[in-house]
Amino acid sequence: MLLRSSLFQEFPISKRLDKFLKANYLPESYIDWAKEHFQPVLDLIVENHKKKPKSPQIFGINGCQGSGKTTLASFICEYISSELDIQAIALSMDDFYLTRSQRQILAQRVHRLLLVRGVPGTHDVELALSTINSLIKGGDTLIPRFDKSEDDRVIESKLTKTSGSVKLIIIEGWCFGARPQTETQLQEPINDLEKKFDAYGTYRKYVNSCLSDKYQRLFEVVDYLLMLKAPSFKSVYKWRLEQEHKLRERFHTESNKTEDSHVMTDTEVWDFIQYFQRITEECLVEMPARANFLYELDDSRNIKLRLSNF
């Protein structure tokens, strides 16, 4: 049985949280559900802020596609902003992808699989680090965004600018906090994608090299790591499929276009998730022991176990 902390009292849903619910198509019951399960995280943020009100806190969230990490990051920021009256912002590693033209060049120079966004090596890590540093300093900061339906970054004129002191930064990503594999682990292909297109290991070795270098510098900036752990990689296809269907629905709702552009079909989703299998499965094995907050999910994304590690 989970005990509710006395740090938070029950109040009517704030305007910020109401806006969050509408933006994410969530019922009001999500707030109570999230508070029940993630209260230890909320409490820690409050306690740290009371001790050092001028110091920013940075959280990293790891979770495979469709695990709910983006929604959780947004909820925590909106909730804490409402409760403490501080500026908080949620960032996604997805928004720091290289542009399509940059990935085209990478695909030509290194390996053609790098045209597809997602794996380490297809992000602009320096942009992510500079964005976080700017937010910490309180300067005017453009928040990068990536349009998955167009498979490219949102143009600068359409980006949101923030300024002033940011006291809570959450950055989430499917490979956030991942560690590189050994040379031995990289030897054998693990799925049809690697067997067919990366028989000699050029692609996976490049991805691993990027992960072992600049990505670790990004992961090291966070104070705490939270993991939403899927039961296995088999759940990823189901969850990613649901995610893509929602993207297609939102695309139709928010635009006058009838075509889905770069929104994927079910078959394309299956092909797509194979890019993530190697690192996802490695995270499922080794990350739980070192995550500060571990939430184990069942196949329906219900939380079946919660652990804290400090």
Image (cartoon, rainbow, N blue to C red):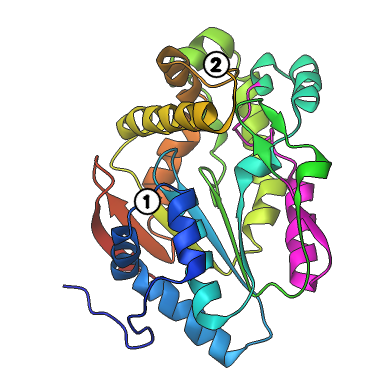
Q: Is residue 132 magenta?
A: yes
> Where's residue 13, x and y in %?
40, 70
Q: Is residue 79 magenta?
A: no
Location of residue 121 with respect to 125 vertically, above or below:
above
Q: Earlier in the sequence, mark 2 or mark 1?
A: 1
Q: Which residues are magenta?
A: 116-144
- 121 vs 60, left or right, is right
Check disc 2 and report the residue beneath it: 258
Q: Say the numbered circle drawn on residue 26.
A: 1
The quadrant of the picture occupied by the C terminus is bottom left
Comparing labels 2 and 1, the label whose residue is closer to the camera: 2
Q: Residue at x 39, y 27 (%)?
A: 241
> Where's residue 66, x and y in %?
41, 39
Secondary structure of the residue carrying numbered label 2: loop
Instruction: Give, as a three-letter code, the residue at label 2.
Output: Thr
Q: Residue at x 74, y 34 (%)?
A: 98
> Where's residue 129, x and y in %?
75, 55
Q: What's the CA distance linking mark 2 and mark 1?
A: 25 Å
Instruction: Give, as a three-letter code, the residue at label 1.
Output: Leu
